[in-house]
Image (spheres, grey):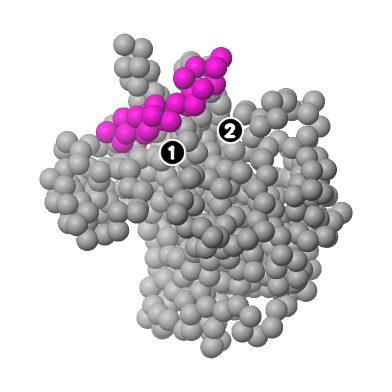
């Protein structure tokens, strides 16, 4: 069913305003709410608020509801399992859903040979598991991570995160011996070079400088990298980048951890984004879209690597049977056509966004793979000066017109709709987005 936006009230509507007042009285203010709306329900690529306003979903709950809002097959699978058992403590008891999901998710992971998986409740827990496993197996104290990376907010994953100041401020001391290095952000190369003539200078610097003078290679357990930086601005590195990183890691016996929490589970047109580079990670951390909205994450590694002692790492809720049932159905849907749809519709959206970039001076760059797309907003193309306030204004203008999307990085519009979205819906959304960009452009020129 194709559903288009329809705004019936002034936003926020009266019911939303009442619930928001209650929320602000009792809920932690640390949440980064941006849209003054109370979501009531969803279906496919559409969302309704409590006042009956209908929105087109270009955020999928921060890349979570990839199979669409309340996909009937996922809901049915979860209900069937809920009628049997809502909770089994995976730490202490065996149950069939976790065994079945483990078999399935290891079969779709790109690593060769036998694999194992540790299930978690979230992305940050999946990263924590990968972080701990790397230290445990390598018996080395150091880790390499990247500037503008986001890996989570719990203390271990926060130590790897280097996305926004507010995420790290006043939480020190963090886990020690994490070294952050520049990422391959070619639109804003930190070394002021150009690709491909740079010959991956950003990788060579890691090996020549950081692994020599800052974090000696023989002391580094792992390098953790997002195949596509998420919260950092949907930054897509060039072909060859991850291959060079992997080669460097192999040379120094450093584990390569791919953080696929946001980029994984089909949204780039492949199950895991790292597959676009043909690189086989040592460990994958994934979550978000794995359960289509139910909380579940996973750290996946070879059976040889994931061979830690009983009790070395465990969980009460990780691998919840209901979440496992939802995840199993999610993977079936991804393999059954949704990944192909992400590739097909994503190509159409990238082409249209590229045309929009040439029509609007404030769109500095368009980048992405599949349905994980970023449009960077700048003051003008020549200066490339970031315009974060304009990006926020465009987001809110689109919201008032019935399109819900989020930003990432300081100044990038994040476009990550459910993979079930149709080409017609995608073009309707982009038309709303362009009208919003035009409206903000005209206001800024006055």
Image quadrant assignment for residue 178: bottom right
Q: Which residues are magenta?
A: 377-400
Q: Residue at the spot x=54%, y=60% of the render?
A: 173
Give the residue number, with chain letter if any, for mark 1. Answer: 407
Give the residue number, with chain letter if any, for mark 2. Answer: 367
Q: Which mark is residue 16?
A: none
Q: Earlier in the sequence, mark 2 or mark 1?
A: 2
Image spot of residue 413 (x, y percent): 46, 34
Image quadrant assignment for residue 148: top right
- Secondary structure of the residue carrying tag 1 is strand
In front here: 290 or 209? Answer: 209
Q: Residue at the spot x=34%, y=29% of the render?
A: 393
- Label 1 Cα neighbours within 10 Å, binned few <14 / some 14-19 / many ≥20: many
- Which of the image's four quarters has the C terminus? top left
Q: Is residue 231 left or right of residue 83?
A: right
- Label 2 Cα neighbours within 10 Å, binned few <14 / some 14-19 / many ≥20: some
């Amino acid at each position: 069913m194709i559903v288009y936006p329809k705004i019936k009230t002034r936003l926020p509507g009266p019911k939303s305003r009442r619930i928001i007042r209650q929320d602000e009285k009792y809920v932690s203010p640390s949440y980064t709410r941006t849209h003054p709306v109370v979501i009531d329900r969803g279906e496919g690529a559409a969302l309704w608020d409590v006042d009956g306003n209908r929105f087109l979903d270009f955020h999928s709950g921060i890349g979570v509801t990839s199979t669409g809002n309340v996909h009937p097959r996922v809901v049915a699978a979860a209900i069937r399992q809920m009628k049997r058992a809502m909770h089994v403590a995976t730490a202490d008891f065996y149950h069939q859903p976790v065994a079945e999901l483990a078999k399935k998710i290891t079969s779709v992971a790109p690593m060769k040979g036998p694999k194992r998986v540790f299930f978690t409740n979230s992305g940050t827990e999946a990263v924590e598991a990968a972080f701990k496993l790397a230290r445990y197996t390598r018996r080395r104290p150091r880790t390499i991570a990247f500037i503008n990376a986001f890996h989570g907010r719990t203390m271990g994953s926060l130590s790897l995160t280097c996305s926004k100041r507010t995420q790290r401020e006043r939480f020190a001391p963090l886990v020690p011996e994490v070294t952050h290095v520049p990422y391959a952000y070619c639109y804003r190369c930190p070394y002021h070079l150009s690709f491909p003539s740079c010959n991956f200078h950003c990788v060579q610097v890691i090996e020549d400088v950081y692994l020599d003078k800052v974090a000696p290679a023989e002391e580094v357990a792992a390098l953790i990298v997002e195949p596509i930086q998420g919260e950092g601005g949907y930054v897509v590195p060039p072909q060859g980048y991850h291959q060079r990183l992997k080669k460097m890691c192999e040379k120094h016996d450093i584990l390569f951890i791919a953080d696929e929490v946001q980029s994984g589970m089909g949204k780039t047109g492949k199950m895991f984004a790292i597959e676009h580079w043909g690189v086989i990670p040592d460990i994958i951390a994934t979550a978000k879209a794995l359960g289509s909205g139910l909380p579940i994450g996973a750290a996946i590694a070879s059976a040889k690597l994931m061979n830690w002692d009983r009790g070395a790492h465990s969980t009460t809720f990780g691998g919840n049977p209901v979440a496992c049932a939802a995840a199993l159905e999610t993977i079936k849907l991804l393999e059954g056509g949704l990944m192909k749809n992400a590739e097909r519709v994503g190509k159409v959206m990238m082409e249209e966004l590229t045309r929009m970039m040439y029509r609007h001076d404030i769109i500095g760059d368009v980048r992405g793979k599949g349905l994980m797309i970023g449009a960077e907003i700048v003051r003008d193309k020549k200066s490339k000066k970031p315009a974060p306030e304009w990006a926020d204004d465009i987001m809110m203008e689109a919201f008032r017109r019935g399109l819900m999307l989020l930003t990432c990085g300081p100044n990038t519009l994040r476009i990550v709709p459910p993979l079930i979205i149709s080409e017609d819906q995608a073009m309707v959304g982009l038309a709303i987005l362009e009208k919003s960009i035009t409206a903000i452009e005209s206001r800024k020129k006055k």
